[in-house]
Amino acid sequence: MADRKSGERNSFKDGDPRFIDLESQDERAYWCKILMATEAELAAAVAAAGTSAEKVKRWLAARRADK
């Protein structure tokens, strides 16, 4: 699957881009870039919000708004 903005390809767990798989280095790198987050921030977001990419995105946005 290609990311429209960057043209990069990423293989999502079970082919589902709606969920973040922290076990996969490729996915961690992909989501860190897309969400403009460090690996630590991504891991904290997944721990707090679950593996849903949309929920992680909202959690990160809310946390950034608090700063």
Image: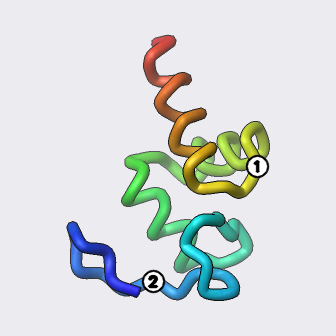
- Identify the residue at image location x=56%, y=49%: 54
Residue with the mark numbered 2: 10
Residue with the mark numbered 1: 50
How packed mark 2 is, by other alpha carbons closer than 10 Å (few <14, some 14-19, many 20 or more), is some
Amino acid identity at mark 1: Gly
The image position of residue 39, as x and y in percent, is: 57, 53
> Residue 40 versus residue 20: which sits nearer the camera?
20
The image position of residue 52, as x and y in percent, is: 67, 55
Q: How many marks?
A: 2
> From what the image shows, is residue 57 above or below residue 51?
above
- Identify the residue at image location x=46%, y=23%: 64
| Res. 3 image quadrant | bottom left
> From what the image shows, is residue 7 above or below residue 21?
below
Residue 63 lies left or right of residue 13; in this view the side is: left
The image position of residue 60, as x and y in percent, is: 53, 35
Q: Which mark is residue 62?
A: none
> From what the image shows, is residue 62 above or below residue 33?
above
* Pointer 1 or 2: first along the chain: 2
Q: Quadrant of the N terminus?
A: bottom left
- Helix, strand or loop at mark 1: loop
- Helix, strand or loop at mark 2: loop
Amino acid identity at mark 2: Asn
